[in-house]
Amino acid sequence: MIDLDETVEFVEKPSSDFYSLRVKQGDYSGVIYTYGKVQLYEDEANCELKVKFTYKLEEVPDNLNEAKLKESTDFRNFMGDILSQLLEDKLHNDKYTIANTQSNN
């Protein structure tokens, strides 16, 4: 499980209506990217929920190569892991909120 607070942070770009993520540590430290279209689909053969997404690289530090990042399976998997964790955290937080709201009625 990824510790989102230590790994990434949301950043606002004046030129965009969407929040981006800045990688705070690790191999991709300093990279800023924005998720585009996100799709969830079931991999029935492996009984797994898969995530498919597009993204845009907003900023790449000088020590990294943008073209290599775009081709990197490791970088794409990293972003997929972050996205999965964000979705999982959102799901758990919403369930907790709904349960508290319903129990208070």
Image: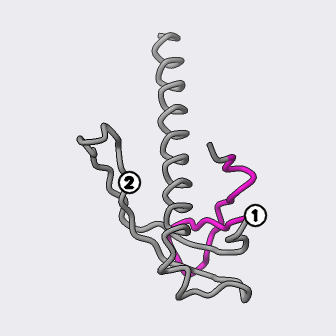
Residue nearer the viewer, 31 or 20: 31
Please provide percent x and percent y for residue 101.
Answer: 50, 19
Q: Is residue 26 above or below residue 87?
A: below
Image position of 61 (left or right of 41): right
Q: Which is more N-terminal, label 1 or label 2?
A: 1
From mark 2 to mark 1, how far is it between C-alphas? 23 Å
Which quadrant of the rendered structure holds the N terminus?
top right
Q: Residue at x 66, y 67 (%)?
A: 22
Magenta segment includes 14: yes
Magenta segment includes 71: no
Q: Residues within 10 Å of mark 2 (few under 14, many from 20)?
A: some
Q: Residue furthest front?
A: 45
Identify which amino acid the numbered label 2 is placed on: Val
Q: Residues within 10 Å of mark 1 (few under 14, many from 20)?
A: few
Q: Which mark is residue 86?
A: none
Q: Residue at x 58, y 68 (%)?
A: 20
Please provide percent x and percent y for residue 105.
Answer: 47, 10
Q: Which mark is residue 51?
A: 2
Please provide percent x and percent y for residue 76.
Answer: 49, 67
Q: Secondary structure at mark 1?
A: loop
Image position of 38 (left or right of 10): left
Identify which amino acid the numbered label 1 is placed on: Gln
Q: Secondary structure at mark 2?
A: strand
Residue nearer the viewer, 80 or 19: 80
Q: Residue at x 50, y 40 (%)?
A: 88
Please provide percent x and percent y for residue 5.
Answer: 72, 50
Q: Residue at x 66, y 50 (%)?
A: 4
Pointer 1: what residue? 25
| Stretch in magenta | 3-25
Q: Is residue 45 above or below residue 62?
A: above
Image position of 32 (left or right of 56): right
